[in-house]
Each structure stands twice: as structure tokens, then as C-alpha cells.
């Protein structure tokens, strides 16, 4: 995999996880506490899987991409 | 070192006010986690978004020392794990849950006694003046093994959740207790009603050279420690910081030696 594709994969994976996490406020608003906790854990588990099963594989190949994402999130508060 | 006379003089000045608000059980107030004569066991701090949390990172020895002084018995390091949970709940804006978790730290109610009050007051002053928790406990003839157990597992250089975040610098013991050696058990403050850590799906097999891969127990422990970060209020709607901090927390926890 070349670096540009790796960057695309890592960014897409990160955004996918963020999209899942972005459901949490509406779930919190409309679910009862136990149901919300269940979804919170499910979303965290799916996010972690995305991170370790997709992003980490890319970062193993291109460690500098991890730093790149980190610096963007630190600078802008989000991946842009 | 503060002269004893100075301590007693300060106590005389503050005694009435402090004893009037004496806390027989750990409680969270604006100063942090307080016990007895308003002794701050763990200070309250704010993360970079202003969310309050209990500053436990790097203060584990101080916390254990003050709890040992309060109960005049050895405080187990396991209490730190529960306080970290409370800190995370506080950072989520769930103060009632934080209070419940603190209440379930397993510490019994403290006797309302002026001697205990002075003991805590003086110990806090001494620690704040630079006396080490080890020297404090040693001077009082209290068991040092919990600090040793903590030191054994605590490496200041090991990867930790960054300071300034709730749950920062997480240190934990897997079972919620520490092996403190022979004959120490009876003298420990009991940890009662420890909440059960929910079992979490260990998830798919992990890859990556830097994480402790394929260890479901470690995975579950780290997941339990980190997943609440996703529940923190975001500083603004489109912020990715929670996601990023969750990943950092998982990475650092999984890399931490068992």
C-alpha cells in the first residue's frame, strides 16, 4: 500500500469511528440509562476494533501517519 | 519540617471551623475528595475543557498515606482504582455517580474524634510542606507495605494517560487488590462492596507490535478503564478529541506492563 492510500484508509477509519461516537448524544437523550450504557460500550468496542484492526495496521507500515493525525487533532481539535 | 508547636497552634485556630464540617466518610466537594476535618485527600482539578476531576495521578502515595493516617490502619492500593472510577464519573459530569463510587470505595465511617482530626490536619500540613508519604507513615509507625506495593507497580516513566485529563496517568491493579505480603491482611482497611466490573467482549484478536495483543483480560481491563472517555462532553460539536483520547488511553493501557 502506498502512503497516500494509507493516509486515506487511516483517515476514513478514524472518521468512521467518530461517526459512531457522534451517535452517543442522541442515544443518551432518547434511551434509558442501561440501554445507553449498552450502546456506549458497543460503540467503544467497535471504535477500538476499527482502531486496532485498521488504523494500527496502517500505522505499523507508516508510523509517521499516526503522528500526522495526532498533530492535526491537537492543532485543530479534529481531523481535517 | 514544621515544628509541632506551629501545627498545634494552627490547629487551635482552625479547629472549630474544621470540626464543625467534619466528614465521617469520603465526600466530594469544591476542594476535591475530603475526609475528616476537611482534609483534602485528592484535590479537584479541571481538564483542558474545564471539566472537574480528582487529581490522582502522581498522588497515589499521598492518598494512601492520608487514608492510613485517618483510619490508623493500612490503606490498600485497591482504593485508588475506585477513586479513579469516581474521577472519570466526575469528568463526565455525573457527580451523583462519582459520589456513589466514592461511597463504595469500601472505607468504613470515620469516628468523629478530635484526635483523628488533628492527626489528619497535621499530616496534610506536613505532606504539603514536603514530608514524603513514606516518612510520614514511618514516623507514625504505620505499615509501609502498601506504598511498597504501589512503588513496585508504579513506574513514573511508564506510558500513562496524559496529565490534565480525567483518568490521566492511570494506575490500576487487575483484581482490585494488591498482594501486600504475610500477615498484613487483617490490618488493612477493608474494601467492601467493590462494584463488579462488567465483563466486556474481549473483541477481535489485536494486531500491532506495540500492544499486548491477544490478552482478553488485559483488553477488558483497558476497555473498562477507557471507554467512558467517549462519554465526556465534547468541547464543541465537531471535536474529535474524545475519540483521540480514547485511542490514546487504550494504547497506553495495553502497553503498560501487567
Image: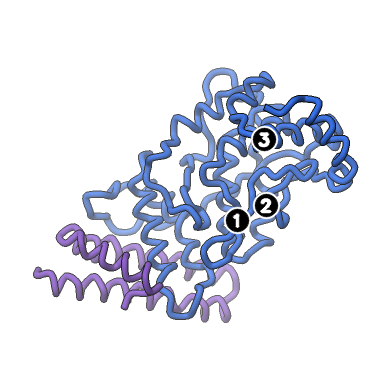
Chain colours: A purple, B blue
Mark 2 or mark 1, earlier in chain: 2
Q: Which subunit holds the residue at mark 2?
A: B
Q: Quadrant of the N terminus of chain B?
A: top right
Mark 1 secondary-structure assignment: strand
In front here: A30 or B114?
B114
Mark 2 or mark 3, earlier in chain: 2
- What residue is pinned by disc 2? B32
Do the residues under discs 2 and 1 have CB atoms within 8 angstroms?
A: yes
Q: Residue at x 51, y 68 (%)?
A: B231
Mark 3 secondary-structure assignment: helix
Q: Which subunit holds the residue at mark 1?
A: B
Image-based side of B39 in relation to B64, left or right: right
x and y percent of residue B111 in the render?
A: 82, 35
- What residue is pinned by disc 1? B45
- What residue is pinned by disc 3? B66
Residue B59 in the image: above or below residue B91: above
Q: Are marks 2 and 3 on the same chain?
A: yes
Q: Residue at x 52, y 57 (%)?
A: B166
Residue B103 in the image: above or below residue A54: above
Mark 3 or mark 1, earlier in chain: 1
Q: Quadrant of the C terminus of chain B?
A: top left
Residue B178 in the image: above or below residue A33: above
Residue occupying the far left of the picture: A2
Image-based side of A76 in relation to B108, left or right: left
Query: How many other residues sit within 10 Å of disc 2, few (<14), some (14-19) or many (≥20)?
Result: many
Amino acid at each position: 500500500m502506498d502512503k497516500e492510500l494509507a493516509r486515506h484508509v487511516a483517515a476514513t477509519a478514524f472518521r468512521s469511528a467518530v461517526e459512531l461516537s457522534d451517535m452517543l448524544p442522541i442515544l443518551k437523550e432518547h434511551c434509558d440509562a442501561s440501554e445507553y450504557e449498552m450502546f456506549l460500550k458497543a460503540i467503544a468496542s467497535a471504535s477500538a476494533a476499527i482502531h486496532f484492526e485498521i488504523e494500527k495496521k496502517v500505522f505499523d507500515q507508516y508510523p509517521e501517519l499516526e503522528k500526522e493525525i495526532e498533530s492535526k487533532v491537537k492543532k485543530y481539535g479534529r481531523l481535517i | 519540617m514544621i515544628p509541632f508547636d506551629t501545627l498545634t497552634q494552627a490547629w487551635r485556630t482552625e479547629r472549630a471551623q474544621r470540626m464543625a464540617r467534619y466528614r465521617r466518610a469520603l465526600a466530594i466537594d469544591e476542594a476535591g475528595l475530603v475526609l475528616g476535618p476537611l482534609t483534602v485527600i485528592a484535590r479537584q482539578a479541571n481538564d483542558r475543557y474545564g471539566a472537574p476531576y480528582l487529581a490522582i495521578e502522581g498522588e497515589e502515595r499521598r492518598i494512601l498515606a492520608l487514608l492510613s493516617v485517618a483510619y490508623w490502619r493500612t490503606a490498600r492500593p485497591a482504593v485508588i482504582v475506585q477513586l479513579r472510577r469516581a474521577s472519570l464519573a466526575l469528568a463526565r459530569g455525573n457527580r451523583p455517580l462519582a459520589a456513589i463510587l466514592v461511597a463504595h470505595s469500601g472505607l468504613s465511617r470515620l469516628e468523629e474524634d478530635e484526635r483523628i482530626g488533628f492527626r489528619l490536619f497535621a499530616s496534610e500540613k506536613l505532606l504539603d510542606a514536603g514530608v514524603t508519604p513514606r516518612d510520614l507513615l514511618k514516623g507514625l509507625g504505620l505499615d509501609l507495605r502498601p506504598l511498597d506495593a504501589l512503588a513496585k507497580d508504579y513506574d513514573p516513566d511508564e506510558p500513562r494517560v496524559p496529565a490534565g485529563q480525567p483518568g490521566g496517568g492511570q494506575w490500576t491493579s487487575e483484581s482490585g487488590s494488591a498482594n501486600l505480603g504475610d500477615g498484613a491482611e487483617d490490618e488493612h482497611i477493608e474494601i467492601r462492596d467493590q462494584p463488579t466490573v462488567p465483563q466486556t467482549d474481549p473483541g477481535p484478536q489485536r494486531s500491532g507490535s506495540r500492544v499486548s495483543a491477544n490478552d482478553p483480560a488485559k483488553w477488558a481491563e483497558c476497555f473498562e478503564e477507557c471507554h467512558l472517555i467517549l462519554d465526556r462532553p465534547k468541547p464543541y460539536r465537531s471535536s474529535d478529541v474524545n475519540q483521540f483520547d480514547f485511542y490514546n488511553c487504550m494504547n497506553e493501557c495495553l502497553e503498560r506492563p501487567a
